[in-house]
Image (tube, grey):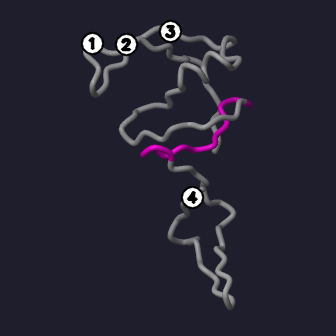
Amino acid sequence: MFSCAIASNPITLNKQGNKDTLNIPHDAIPFNYIRNHISLISKVDSITGNIIFDSGADGLYLDSIFFKNNPFGQFKYISAILPGIGSSGGQKVEVITDKLNFSV
């Protein structure tokens, strides 16, 4: 598990004898680095899961299994084609058009 913090509230290292400890700020964002992806433990409307951080994405994209296994059916959504690197012609996706609450 990693975390990041802003420069005004940095992560600091305490050296006490043979034991080193990190002081992680209360507002630091914890994340996991899994198979070259940054994963954030997040909450989308009351549903908690691991969200992959994609710096090239212009929105929040939920994995199809996460979407299928959770109660997103009460939201309005439309079908769309999402272009992307490595896809020829794009990929069919469902786009939630309602407002969702997202927190890390």
Q: What residue span does the magenta drawing correspond to?
A: 34-46
Q: Secondary structure at mark 4?
A: strand
- Label 4 crowd (10 A; few <14 / some 14-19 / many >=20): few
Q: Secondary structure at mark 1?
A: loop
Which three-letter amino acid code belongs to the residue tagged 3? Answer: Ile
Q: Nearer the viewer, mark 2 or mark 3?
A: 2
- Graded by Cα atoms within 10 Å as few (under 14), some (14 to 19) or many (20 or more), the crowding at tag 1 reads few
Q: Amino acid at mark 4?
A: Phe
Residue plotted at (37% across, 12% down)? 81
For marks 4 and 3, the one nearer the N-term is 4
Q: CA distance from mark 4 to mark 2?
A: 34 Å
The residue lying at 66 percent from left, 73 percent from top is 23
Q: Nearer the viewer, mark 4 or mark 2?
A: 4
Residue 89's disc is 1
Residue 2 marker? 4
Q: Is residue 27 left or right of residue 81?
A: right
User: Which amino acid is tagged 2?
Assistant: Ile
The residue carrying mark 2 is 81
Q: Real-space Cα distance between discs 3 and 1?
A: 18 Å
Circle nearer the N terminus (2, 1): 2
